Each structure stands twice: as structure tokens, then as C-alpha cells.
Image: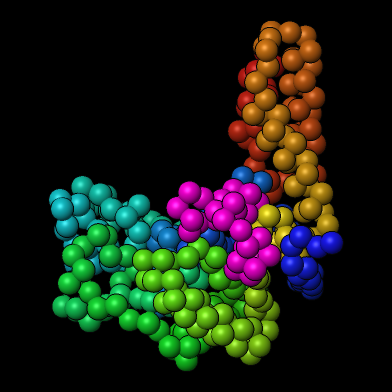
Amino acid sequence: MEFILPFQIDPSPHKISYDQKIFFLGSCFTEEIGNNFKNLKFDVLQNPNGILYDPVSISSSLSSYIENKQFADDDLFLHDEIWHSWQHHSAFSGLDKDTVLKNINQSQSHANSFLKTTSWLVITLGTSFHYLLKDKNEPVANCHKAPANYFDKRLISIDDIYSRLSTAIKKLRLYNPGINIIFTISPVRHVRDGVTENNRSKARLIEAVHSIVEHNNNVFYFPAYELVIDVLRDYRFYKSDMVHANEIAVNYVFEIFCNTYLNDAAKELIIELKSLVNAMNHRPFQKESVAHKNFLKKQLEIARKIIAANPTINLTKEIDYFSCNDR
């Protein structure tokens, strides 16, 4: 008897290894997956503009990274005593204008150099809705809780989504010819748009992305949306807001993503690194006991062996921890 919908995902012919960089861009769901990779010591860059949701914002941000666009004073605005950028998440906002601008431009420069050498770009689209600032008729990536009458809300057409993302891919190919691109659709429901409207929005994203995958080499679709919505298909896999996938769901999707895209060496190394992380989180009853000191020595040896075999992995924090506690 089957209790979940059987869903076969073929392994990717292109594999991710630990010596490759991964660039994550898009919704809060991509940050959940990206954090898992970061915690497992992959070389990762996540959302240099902060969280982005719609294809207009995502394609525009990609162009800005390629061009290494540097923002100026007139790109910021003051709202409720805080300086913001319409193209950035509130994580970049602050009381001091110069600091905000400095942080934004440093992030732009880092994204420019990382994108040039990254092997993988993972883009998670959240919604087909986007907002235009009325007085400038310009798209915004974040409304920063400004009054609703500042904006026009629009539903992007399938053709427009396809066109914008395809153009971004062409620019990427010129900037970094060897890049592989994975598209996913966020399973997070944008219920503020309305349940029916959210489904319509997701349908447009799915159709546009599948068309892009069909017409481009080394561009892939990973069904994160289907895994949560159709396979797990239960509110017990959501947080209390009934909208965001919970830790169990995220870990489930992450595991399948790894099985689909990671090479065998990376899969084996993940097991070792998870064990090392668990060892760091271990809280002994008696820190001064011989048994605990031997445990720390063993973990220190494991960490050093991992680094010897994988020089690109940064285990400085782990080595410092086990060395310090071994004294």
C-alpha cells in the first residue's frame, strides 16, 4: 500500500562537487535550501539583494550583477526614518544612508565576481505578481511596507516571464559560459494574493520555466514545488502559518535535491560533515572527563583528514572548537 504519491526524479547528468561554487537566488525557500548547503561547507552565495520573489526582480538583479552596477544616493529613499532601496530587501535598510549604500555596493561587487566563477545558479521563483512604483513607473523588488497607493500590482504574462528570463540566461552565458542553471518554483503559498490567484501565478511560472528548460542547454528544472504540494501534501509539513514549508519538508526536498545533483564523493562527504556538526553540538555531562577529551581528539583528527582530502573546504571553526576544548 502506498501512502505517498510515487514520484520518480531522474538523476542529473551534470553533478555538483565540493570544489564548485553555488549561487542561490530568489525566494525565501531558496534560502532554506541554500542554508543547508552553506552549513555543509559548500562555497555558497545567497541573494545579494536579499530575498526576491518575481521574475522581473530576479532577471533585473542578475543583469546588475553581471554589469557590477553600483548604486548611488538617488537610488535610495527615506521612509519612516530609514533608508531603503526599492531593489533590495529590508536586510540592507538602515538609519545611515552612507552605510546602506556601502553595504549594497559591496554586495554587488561580491556577486559580480562570484557569478563569474560559479558553476551553478539555482533560481527559485515565488510569484508572477510584481509591483510598479507609480510615480516612476519602475518595478520594485520590495515594497518596504510603504502605502499601497504607491504601487500598481500586475500579473506578469507567461510570454513576459519567458522573455525576461531567457534574456538573463543569454547574458549569463556570455559572462560565464560554463554555468549550469537550475530553476525551482517555491512551494510557499502567496495567500495574500488570494488562493486562486496564487495558483494562477504559480501556473504561469511553471509553464514559462519548462519552456526555458526545453530551449536551453544545461538549464534544468527541479520539482521542489511538486514535492511539497503533491507528494507531501499535508499541513503537518508546514509551519504554523500554513504557508511556509517546515523543517521536515525542507530537509526532505534538500535530500532529494542532493540525490539528484550531487556526485558520489559529495554525498559521502556530506555524511562525514553532518557527523562533525553533530559532534560540535554535543554537550557532555563531564567536560573534564578522559572520555570526552578522547572524543574531542578523535573529532579533531577527522576534521583534519577532511581538510587534507578536500583543501577547498573551510573547517576553521570546527578545528578551533575541538582544539580549544581539547586543552
- Residue 226 at x, y percent in the picture: 64, 70
Lateral position of residue 131 relative to residue 299, left or right: left
Seen at 38% across and 56% down, the residue is 106
Which quarter of the rendered picture does the C terminus lie within?
top right
- The verdict on residue 237 being magenta is yes
The relative height of residue 47 versus residue 170 in the rendered view (above or below) is above
Which residue ends up furthest to the front in the rendered image? 1
Lateral position of residue 323 relative to residue 143, left or right: right
The coloring applied to the image is rainbow
Seen at 74% across and 14% down, the residue is 293
Is residue 169 shown to the viewer in this render? no
Name which quarter of the figure residue 133 lies in.
Answer: bottom left
Lateral position of residue 143 relative to residue 247, left or right: left
The relative height of residue 100 versus residue 176 in the rendered view (above or below) is above
The magenta segment is 225-251
Question: For this rendering, which residue is in front, 280 or 65?
Answer: 280
Seen at 53% across and 59% down, the residue is 29
The relative height of residue 247 versus residue 104 in the rendered view (above or below) is above
Is residue 318 shown to the viewer in this render? yes
